[in-house]
Amino acid sequence: MKPVMAKLSGTYKGKLDVIFIDVKKDHDTARRFGVYMIPVQVFLDKEGKEFHRHVGFYPFDEIAPVLMKAGI
């Protein structure tokens, strides 16, 4: 997922913050977001409310429409 995350970060620079959490090291954050499988992508709005979640590899071409629908 790192190459996809890098592309998202570059494509949506200034509109989207892409944050990678190593859940093997940061157990508290994993619990906070209910991450029990990896990889998982959790999309939050400006207020921190989750608006989309996906488990497994997530290609850029499938993420872009989700972001467009969210107004990003």
Image: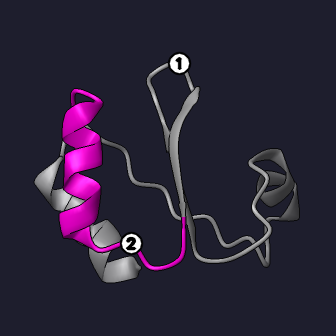
Placement of the N terminus among the 4 image quadrants:
bottom left
Q: Is residue 39 left or right of residue 26?
A: left
Residue interval drawn in magenta: 55-72
Against 46, is 68 above or below? below
The image shows residue 49 at horizontal and vertical percentages of: 58, 26
Q: Residue 14, image x and y in percent?
A: 20, 37
Whether the magenta-drawn stretch holds residue 64 is answered as yes
Q: Is residue 42 visible?
A: no
Residue at numbered disc 1:
47
For the residues marked 2 and 1, what is the alpha-carbon distance in whole angstroms?
Answer: 24 Å
Q: In this view, does 27 lie above or below 15?
A: below
Which quadrant, please, contains the C terminus?
top left
- Quickly name the residue at label 2: 58
For residue 60, side relative to residue 38 (left or right):
left
Horizontally, residue 25 falls left or right of residue 4, namely right
Amino acid type, label 2: Tyr
Residue 52 or residue 44, whichever sits in front: 52
